Image (tube, rainbow, N blue to C red):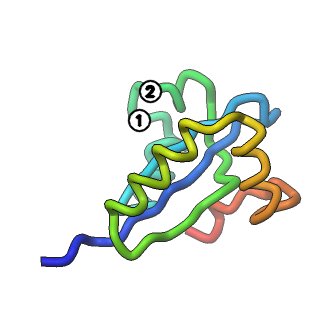
Amino acid sequence: MPEKGGYVYILANITHSVLYTGVTNDIARRLYEHQQGSIDSFSKRYKTTKLVYIEFFNDIRDAITAEKTIKAGSRSNKESLIVEANPEWADLSKDF
């Protein structure tokens, strides 16, 4: 049975000083949880609610691999991903 797809995403706080990288199979639900602070987590503590990067994968396992790669990279690498896909650092959550 094929795996369901998934998203890897990066959230920023209002000043872009903190970045959070995550993975989910339901981006709308996960964004709601982050923005409402309904889960006691890093994201809630540092108010990372602005979606600045998102990438969809047909297989959740590929999304998980991408998340691990992004998390293992430097902040500079994360910023490069964001700038390439979203040069204005606009909040992309409005699309979901």
Along the line of sight, the residue nearer the viewer: 8 or 34: 8
- Residue at (87%, 58%) from the top-left corner? 88
The residue that label 2 is drawn on is 41
Quadrant (top left, top right, bottom left, bottom right) of the C terminus: bottom right
Q: Which residue is mark 1?
A: 38
| Residues at marks 1 and 2 touching, judged by CB atoms closer than 8 Å | no
Residue lying farthest right? 88
Q: Nearer the viewer, mark 1 or mark 2?
A: 2
* Residue occupying the point 61% across, 25% down: 46
Q: Tag 2, which secondary structure?
A: loop
Looking at the picture, does residue 88 appear above or below residue 74?
A: below
Comparing 66 with 42, the one in front is 66
Judge by depth and name the residue closer to the eye, 17 or 49.
17
Q: Quadrant of residue 82?
A: bottom right
- Residue 64 at what x, y percent from top left? 39, 53
Q: Please, what is the three-letter code of the amino acid marked with disc 1?
A: Ser
Provide residue 19's location: percent of width, then percent of height: 66, 36
- Decide: is 72 above or below 28: above
CA distance for labels 1 and 2 = 9 Å
The crowding category of the residue bearing disc 2, from other C-alpha atoms within 10 Å (few below 14, some 14 to 19, many at least 20), is few
* Left or right for 9, reference 91: left
Location of residue 58 (image quadrant): bottom left
Instruction: Identify the disc placed on residue 86.
Output: none
Which quarter of the rendering shows the N terminus? Answer: bottom left
Q: Position of residue 44 (x, y in %)?
A: 52, 28
From the viewer's perspective, tell me whether residue 9 is left or right of residue 64: right
Which residue shows up at 69% across the image and 40% down it? 12
